[in-house]
Image (cartoon, rainbow, N blue to C red):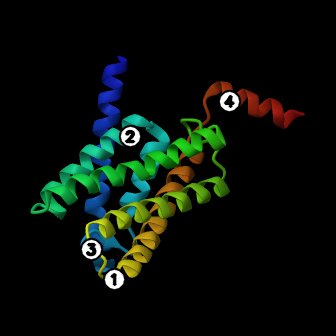
């Protein structure tokens, strides 16, 4: 597969999976919504973090496109400034955590070097960065009504959603067979 085609499918796949996770979240956790777009459990936050950890810049571009689509056409169709800024903020936070993971943990695309503790740290970092950036924007726009409550709810929702998605995918990846070369290396370690 050509590099350009791979980038296209990475971006498109991210956008589709994000919007699917948003739909699932709306169907399952609609009763956990505090205010429009702020849920006590928010599965799309896990997709945001996971897509940037797995796909880097392609994941971030897919998230930006999907975030703009849902913000402009679903969440805030009558507020283009909030939709535009919200899409950027929703993409910056997981991408910043991805960059942190690259630098701090020497992140691998397979996430094999991310221990459960490291996943927890990254989920926590994202769950602080995302609501904080959003609420700084809200405060700058003069929207300070119930700011602390919304910030806390968004933190909890992002953290819960990120943990659910990260550990589910990490568990699924652990069940997949190892590539032949990695299997031979592991067998050699077991023999010694």
Badge 4: residue crowd in 10 Å (few <14, some 14–19, many ≥20): few
Residue topped by disc 1: 146
- For the residues labelled 3 and 4, say whether their Cβ atoms are less than 8 Å apart: no
Q: Is residue 79 above or below residue 191?
A: below
- Residue 10 visible: yes
Q: Earlier in the sequence, mark 3 or mark 4?
A: 3
- For the residues labelled 4 and 1, say whether their Cβ atoms are less than 8 Å apart: no
Dot 4 falls on a residue whose secondary structure is: helix
> Real-space Cα distance between discs 1 and 2?
32 Å
Of marks 4 and 2, the one in the foreground: 2
Q: Earlier in the sequence, mark 4 or mark 1?
A: 1
Residue topped by disc 4: 182
Q: Is residue 92 left or right of residue 179?
A: left
Residue topped by disc 3: 143
Residue at the spot 37% in from the left edge and 35% down from the top edge = 58
Dot 1 falls on a residue whose secondary structure is: loop
Dot 3 falls on a residue whose secondary structure is: loop
- Give whichever of 177, 87 is nearer the camera: 87
Residue topped by disc 2: 59
Residue 159 place in picture, x, y as percent: 49, 66
Of marks 3 and 4, the one in the foreground: 3
Residue 190 place in picture, x, y as percent: 83, 37
Residue 144 place in picture, x, y as percent: 31, 77
Dot 2 falls on a residue whose secondary structure is: helix
Q: In the picture, residue 11 is in which quadrant?
A: top left
């Amino acid at each position: 597969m050509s590099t350009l085609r791979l980038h296209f499918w990475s971006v498109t796949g991210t956008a589709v999976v994000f919007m699917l996770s948003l739909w699932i979240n709306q169907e399952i956790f609609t009763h956990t919504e505090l205010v429009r777009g702020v849920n006590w459990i928010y599965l799309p936050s896990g997709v945001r973090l996971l897509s940037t950890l797995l796909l880097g810049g392609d994941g971030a571009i897919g998230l930006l496109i999907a975030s703009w689509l849902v913000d402009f056409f679903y969440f805030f169709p009558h507020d283009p400034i909030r939709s535009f800024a919200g899409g950027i903020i929703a993409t910056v936070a997981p991408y910043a955590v991805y960059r942190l993971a690259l630098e701090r943990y020497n992140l691998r695309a397979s996430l094999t070097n991310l221990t459960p503790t490291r996943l927890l740290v990254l989920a926590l970092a994202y769950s602080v960065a995302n609501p904080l950036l959003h609420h700084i924007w809200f405060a700058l726009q003069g929207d300070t009504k119930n700011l602390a409550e919304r910030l806390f709810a968004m933190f909890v929702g992002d953290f819960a959603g990120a943990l659910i998605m990260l550990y589910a995918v990490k568990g699924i990846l652990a069940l997949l067979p190892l590539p032949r070369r990695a299997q031979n290396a592991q067998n050699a370690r077991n023999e010694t």
